[in-house]
Image: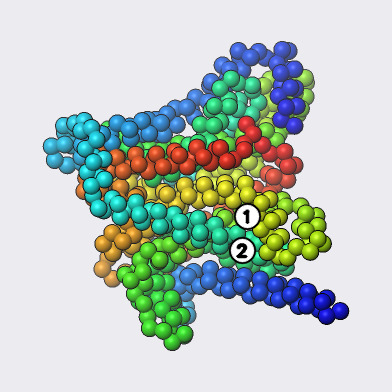
Amino acid sequence: MKANVDASVSLYRGSHFSRQRDSYRAAIFLFPTFALLLVFFFVPIVLTFYFAFTNMSLTGSASIHTEFVGFDNFSSMFADPNFRTAVWNTIIVLIFSAVIGQQVLGLIIALMMNERNRKFRSLIGTLVIAGWVTPEIVVAFIWFAFLSDQGTANIMLGWLGAKPVSWLYQFPMTSVVVANIWHGTAFSMLVFQSALGDVPKEVTEAAMIDGASGWQRLWRVTLPMIKGSIVTNMVLITLQTLGLFTLIFSLTGGGPGNKTETLPLYMYHQAFANYQLGYGTAISLILLVIGIIASISYIRFLKVQI
Amino acid sequence: MPKRSIRWNRFVAEKVIAYAVLSLIGVLFIVPLLWMIFASFDPAATLSVNVPAKPTLQNFASIVTDKANQRAFANGIFLSLGQSILIVIVAGLAAYPLSRYQLKFKRPFMYIILFTTGLPITAVMVPVYELFLYLHFEDSIIWTMMFLTATALPYAIWIMKNFMDSVPIDLEEASWVDGASVWASLRKIVVPLMLPGTFTVAIFTFSHSWGNFFVPFILIQTPEKLPASVSIYQFFGQYGTVEYGKLAAFSFLYTIPAVLLYILSQRYMSAGFNFSGGTKG
């Protein structure tokens, strides 16, 4: 289809307009895009690589005389136990809320929904999507109320005869992870639903006739067939969770102490609460490099047609 | 016969378990939302979930009539709507040559676009803030809108190009043969057929921008300029004792546009994909 379009365009080109005029017109059409991406995307990325090696600050003498300090920011960062905590917390959130939580729960929901009653399916789907459509800041409030001392979670525990738990203080990381699963699972569910929709029915039916059990069909037939979607989804939710800020910031503020402080919150606190812009940029550079690696692998896994 | 009944039982059991587990998941997803719904109608709301004894619209009324809240919603609409319009224009312009012409730099350009789609915005926020300070762009709704436009642009171009690829070029060619100029065929043929795609992009952009807390939180300082996403946070954080009923009502009102836009986007999405007929790139 695509090849046909290109061929017919070039057939017409000779009579209607020339290749040179095409590139001239393309340049005009693409100019606003170039300008916006250059100023607000590529310049900041290049600036990250420069500012990360300066002592730039919002207050004090370094705010007037910004100096190049080499790897100072990085050596103090790696010596800072809070940085190590932030890296560790980021990894925990990534693994438990994104890769295991959203991905596995989304896959389970999609698999169980397959071949169920249509109305039931859309009812459950709507409830899961409600969590996804709710703006992140509202998700934080809802979960703050849900997990508060008199909140719904403790009321439900009371029904089971258990004592109330101070969730946000005793289990802050679990709270963040669960809230993020609630917010993000719908995305994975939708990805897997459409992937499962593309699996031809004949294949699973053939396996069923050959006597394969439900598990065997899942492991040997269904999962291998949606492998591509699993990998793409994993990279996408990893990137989303890597940048997660609003939910943690307004649910726990990174606390208590720094128990839920991930890299984005650590970056925010250093740059905007301690006014160490250079140091904050150095953390930003670490995030950026992880993001670049994940983004490149995303493109590699995703076999796109351009 | 017995073998068959074992198989039949297993089949029923699998079905029953699936329905039970899915129902439980559904309940777990709705329960956290209940607090917001109940508290917003409860004049004496706390953090506990209670069915309001006397449900009123009092909380909503006090949110809607408050000048500061009106301004916050107006700022949010201005920011998100402005961004959506800019995105549609800029991405629409960019998509045309990328879809129709054979350009040498097309492939690397599309890869760069795809690459930037993936990067988390959080990672560039500190240098962007520094850039804004240097250019004196800080505390401006317009420049915040420009930055948001740039961040949403790669994704929008990608979708727009896919939609445009599915508008058959034959129709354009036919109008050229009839003597129409490139511009006229663009206006009369491509633009109308692109409407579903355009709405999809606009709705997507609006709802992402509407829900965005982090970017305006960093780039805008003056309380009068803040959109609803940020003023709701201040509402929550600034007062010692929060009026939970009002907070819930604000959250509810703030969530409604996101939900409506999602429903709308589903309609346009399916309309768009039906007409593309499965030839998306």
Tag 2 subunit: A
Residue ID at (75%, 32%): A1
Indicate which disc residue A94 carries.
none
- Where on the picture, by quarter, is residue A59? top left
Could you tell me residue B216's position as x and y percent?
Answer: 37, 47
Could you tell me residue B130's position as x and y percent?
Answer: 29, 37
Looking at the picture, tell me which residue is in the foreground, B167 or A304: A304
Q: Earlier in the sequence, mark 1 or mark 2?
A: 2
CB within 8 Å, label 1 to label 2: yes
Q: Look at mark 1 in the image and give the residue it sits on.
A: A192
In this rendering, is residue B148 above or below A33?
below
Could you tell me residue A141's position as x and y percent?
Answer: 40, 65
Could you tell me residue A272's position as x and y percent?
Answer: 26, 47
Residue ID at (40%, 53%): A91
Instruction: Name the amino acid, label 2.
Output: Ile
Relative placement, left or right, of B18 versus A241 is right
| Residue density around tag 1, few if under 14, some if 14–19, many if 20 or more, within 10 Å | many
Q: Look at mark 2 in the image and give the residue it sits on.
A: A109
